[in-house]
Image (cartoon, rainbow, N blue to C red):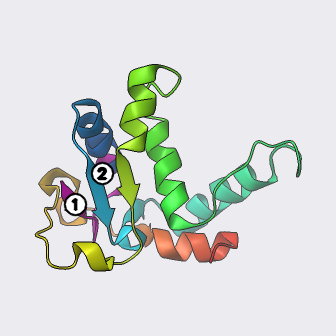
């Protein structure tokens, strides 16, 4: 299953991907940098800065700054990753920035319930912008 993440809400997309992975689907998510996080930008950035400053530099907890790993970590929180079926499901999910060459000619789906057009809010920011502000690539 290939999912185009353009203009999809990140939490709803992550929960859908987690459920499908637990059911046995292999999931490739493309355009992960174009997902959106709802909420006001100052609140989102403040929350992420708080997460980054928590802990010790060498001992952790470690937070991800680039888009692919940020999303994978988000999905991991929705899986029973300490159990065997959760570990296997987590390995079935692959995230890609942009569209990789081996997936260009294949048809991508979208998740209708996760679209930003279904919400009434105008307060959101893209994952690529948040990653750039956190020091990601």
Q: Is residue 129 left or right of residue 86?
A: right
- Residue 100, numbered label: none
User: Per the image, is 101 magenta?
Assistant: no
Regarding mark 2 in the picture, which secondary structure is present there?
helix
Measured from the top left, where is residue 92 in percent x and y?
A: 35, 44
Distance between the alpha carbons at the discs numbered 1 and 2 = 9 Å
Residue at the image position 29 percent from the left and 45 percent from the top: 17
- Residue 3, numbered label: 1
In terms of depth relative to the viewer, which is nearer, 116 or 132? 132
For residue 27, above or below residue 106: above
Q: Residues within 10 Å of mark 1 (few under 14, many from 20)?
A: some
In terms of depth relative to the viewer, which is nearer, 45 or 60? 60
Q: Which tag, 1 or 2, sits closer to the chain's start?
A: 1
Residue at the image position 54 percent from the left and 56 percent from the top: 70
The residue identified by callout 2 is: 13
Question: Which quadrant is home to the C terminus?
Answer: bottom right
Measured from the top left, where is residue 133 in percent x and y?
A: 65, 75
Q: Quadrant of residue 96?
A: bottom left
Q: Is residue 24 left or right of residue 107?
A: right
């Amino acid at each position: 299953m290939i999912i185009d993440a353009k203009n999809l809400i990140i939490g709803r997309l992550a929960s859908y991907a987690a459920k499908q992975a637990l059911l046995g689907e292999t999931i490739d998510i493309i355009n992960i940098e174009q997902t959106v996080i709802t909420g006001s930008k100052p609140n989102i950035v403040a929350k992420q800065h708080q997460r980054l400053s928590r802990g010790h530099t060498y001992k952790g907890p470690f937070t991800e700054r680039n888009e692919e790993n940020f999303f994978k970590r988000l999905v991991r929180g929705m899986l029973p990753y300490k159990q065997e079926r959760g570990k296997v499901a987590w390995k079935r999910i692959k995230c890609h920035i942009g569209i990789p060459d081996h997936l260009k000619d294949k048809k991508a789906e979208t998740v209708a319930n996760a679209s930003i057009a279904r919400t009434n809010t105008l307060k959101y920011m893209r994952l690529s912008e948040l990653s750039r502000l956190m020091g990601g690539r």
